[in-house]
């Protein structure tokens, strides 16, 4: 091999040196570097898993919030409907009370009117009786018994009121 310019003992020495260097580097550098890369790969996987879990949690939370918003919206709508029903019932109750009050006032007014009418009729009867007695005294020209005249006038008025009411 000398003819080729290759020194065999130098080549073997270099090959042995290379193998020894390779074994030393393999043991001292390659294994720690592989361990460090595996460790880094595991951390990246864990980070990706954590990111996926966070994303899933965010989606789940978002759906939960959306559900809560829908529930709150439905509850608010129910409250509005309930308030409208209560307001309607209150309005109806107040209308019923007002109708009862109006009817009571109307009945009271009718009673007052009837009483005033009866009072006015009685007063007209008294005045008419007095006028009739005065007229009869003037016609007869003498003083008549007032009690007898009043009784006679009352009978005439009662007959007249009975005939007008029938």
Image (cartoon, rainbow, N blue to C red):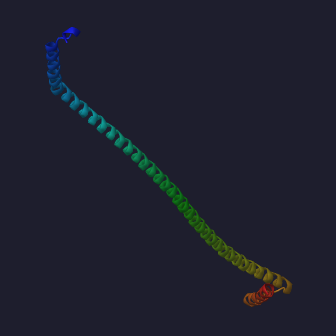
Residue placed most toward the observer, 81 or 160 = 81
Q: Picture quarter containing residue 125?
A: bottom right
Residue placed most toward the observer, 98 or 20 = 20
Q: Picture quarter containing residue 106?
A: bottom right
Residue 53, image x and y in percent? 34, 43
Q: Is residue 157 above or below residue 20?
A: below
Residue placed most toward the observer, 94 or 166 = 94
Residue 37, image x and y in percent? 25, 30
Quick one: which residue is furthest to the right in this view? 139
Residue 56 in the figure: left or right of residue 133: left
Give the quarter of the figure containing the N terminus.
Answer: top left
Residue placed most toward the observer, 136 or 20 = 20
Residue 69 in the figure: left or right of residue 31: right
Q: Is residue 127 above or below residue 39?
A: below
- The residue depicted at 45 percent of the width and 48 percent of the height is 66
Residue 75, image x and y in percent? 48, 56
- The residue depicted at 60 percent of the width and 65 percent of the height is 95
- The residue depicted at 84 percent of the width and 85 percent of the height is 141
Number of numbered discs on residues? 0
Residue 56 in the figure: left or right of residue 85: left
Residue 65, image x and y in percent? 42, 48
Q: Is residue 125 above or below residue 88?
A: below
Give the quarter of the figure containing the C terminus.
Answer: bottom right
Residue 8 in the figure: left or right of residue 139: left
- The residue depicted at 14 percent of the width and 22 percent of the height is 20
């Amino acid at each position: 091999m000398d003819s080729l310019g290759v020194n065999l003992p130098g080549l073997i020495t270099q090959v042995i040196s290379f193998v020894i260097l390779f074994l030393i580097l393999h043991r001292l550098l390659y294994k720690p570097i592989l361990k460090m890369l595996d460790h880094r790969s595991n951390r990246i996987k864990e980070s990706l898993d954590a990111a996926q879990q966070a994303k899933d949690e965010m989606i789940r939370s978002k759906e939960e919030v959306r559900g809560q918003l829908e529930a709150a919206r439905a509850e608010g709508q129910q409250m509005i409907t309930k308030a409208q029903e209560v307001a309607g019932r209150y309005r109806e109750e107040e209308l019923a009370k007002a109708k009862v009050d109006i009817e009571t006032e109307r009945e009271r007014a009718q009673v007052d009117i009837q009483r005033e009418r009866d009072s006015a009729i009685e007063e007209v009867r008294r005045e008419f009786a007095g006028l009739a007695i005065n007229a009869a005294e003037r016609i007869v020209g003498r003083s008549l018994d007032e009690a007898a005249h009043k009784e006679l006038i009352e009978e005439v008025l009662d007959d007249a009121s009975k005939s007008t009411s029938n």
